[in-house]
Image: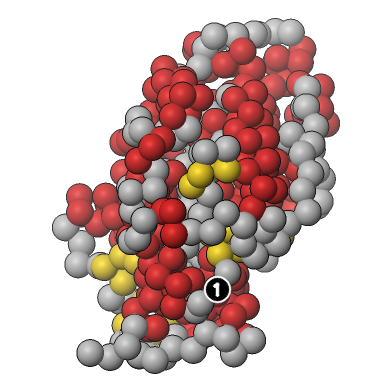
Amino acid sequence: MKLKLEDFDKGTQECIRCRNCTIGAQVPGVPAVEVCPFHKYHNNNRVYSAQSFWQTTKSLLLGDISLSPLFTDLLFQCTTCGSCVEHCVFHLMQNPYVDSVKLVEYLRSEMVKKGFGVPIHLKFGEHIEKEHNPYMELHQNRWDWLPFKKEKLPKTAEYVFFVGCTSSYRQKQIAKATVNILEKLGLDYTVMCRPGMDEWCCGSPLQRTGQEDKAKTVAEHNLEAIKKTGAKKVITSCSGCYKMISKDYKELYDLDYDFEIVQSVQFLLDLVKKGELEFANPVNMKVTYHDPCHLGRHMGVFEAPRELLKSIPGIELVEMERNREYAWCCGAGGGVRAAYPDITMFASTNRIKEAEDTGADALVSACPFCWRGLHDAIEEKGSKLEIFDVVELVEKAMKNRS
Ligand code: SF4
Ligand code: SF4
């Protein structure tokens, strides 16, 4: 459904400038934790906040201002993490109008239409059109991580593993671990790697940065390609792909499909529950889990990764202070890592400190893009924490003892 500025009018009236979306703490039952990474980065300056998105929208609706490059830093430094939405009084009262992430994505698309997009976002947008990934890589190299020749994979299968650009080109160890698990379980799966049936970027980097028309084009391609495989279930590695295909393809682009979509942790936990996945090796490690915004807050998947981790013998799971719907964002999403790397580093080092405070040996997440942002911060800080995706620990626990 195409949104219009007027769709946000009710939200502008209902925002009471309470600042829960920045400093939190004022709603009974909601923990008093810091909420917004870009607000905190700007020393709690309220100009940089979800509240400010609503005030800006009010002025736009009144015709007092119009969008211009002056708004770039306000609108494009938000990681679209959704923490402000979770803390907003009116959202908590189930008012669908008060969704700051929908609003900021809408305002970004208006900025792009007016020619005020962020150059680096537009550059990866052009590259996605040409080579179907935002990493300036060649499409033909998308499957280089496969541990065998891609021709070995069947054209049709019960399951499709939708790898995503980050696991395909950067955090390849997550893609490999997933395929190794699927192989070991002997499942009927494939990866979309043939001409006309090839995986493209899911479109999330485009949608998050105001390039929704390009995002819709890749969505249509991907759905067509998935249909050709005849898959009943699509498994994603990336939490961003999971949210994009499950929610945005349907809600934002009115696209329909009849397969089921799950993130790796949900898929694997289901197998554990059915007794079809058992672990041969203990993984003796104290870990803490970072909720990816797109899996947790945006899709409500909080318990599956935790249950899966706890099912691995030897794992001790401890929680960070900010967890589940109140988790602190890794700072990489919403196009921020590409355009404002200092904000990403600020948010991710903040998260690493919180993980260290738990006394865990390792930080675990369920998203290659979070892995990337958090890993950079571990290096920057010289932290002793190890970092894993949940599937990497599952693979370790499945390996035969040598
Ligand atoms: S989505 Fe996240 S970064 Fe953006 S305003 Fe809300 S809390 Fe801040
Ligand atoms: S929490 Fe909601 S109502 Fe309060 S200032 Fe933020 S957007 Fe407005």
Along the line of sight, which residue is nearer the eye, 176 or 39? 176
Q: Nearer the viewer, residue 315 or 400?
A: 400
Figure check: 285 above or below 193 = below
Q: Is residue 400 left or right of residue 301?
A: left
11 sits left or right of 84 in the view:
right
Relative to the observer, which residue lies in front, 400 or 284?
400
Which quadrant is the N terminus positioned in? top right
Is the shortest distance between ligand 1 and the CB of mark 1 under 8 Å? no
Q: Position of residue 7 (x, y in %)?
A: 81, 27
**Residue 225 sits above or below residue 87 on the image:** above
Color theme of the render = secondary structure
**Which part of the image, by quadrant, shows the C terminus?**
bottom left
The spot of residue 67 in percent (x, y) is 61, 11
Residue shown at 38% from the left, 28% from the top = 339
Rendered image quadrant of residue 141: top left
Q: Is residue 161 above or below residue 169?
A: below
Numbered label tally: 1
Near mark 1 (Cα within 10 A), the count class, few <14, some 14-19 or many ≥20, is few
Task: Find disc 1 in the rendering and name its residue.
Answer: 187
Give the image location of residue 27, x and y in percent. 68, 57
Q: Residue furthest left?
A: 382
Direction from residue 350 to residue 133 in the image, left or right: right
Can you give x and y, in whole percent of width and height, for residue 270 in the image? 62, 78
Judging depth in this view, the residue of 89 and 116 nearest the camera is 116
The answer to whether residue 126 shows anywhere in this view is yes
In percent of the image, x 70 and y 62: which residue is there? 232
Which residue corresponds to the image point at 48% horizontal and 47% vertical from the top-left? 193
- Of helix, strand and loop, which one carries label 1? loop
Looking at the rendered structure, the kind of residue marked 1 is Leu
Up-down relation of residue 186 to residue 35 (above or below): below
Look at 31% across and 65% down and name the residue there: 387
Q: Is residue 239 visible?
A: no
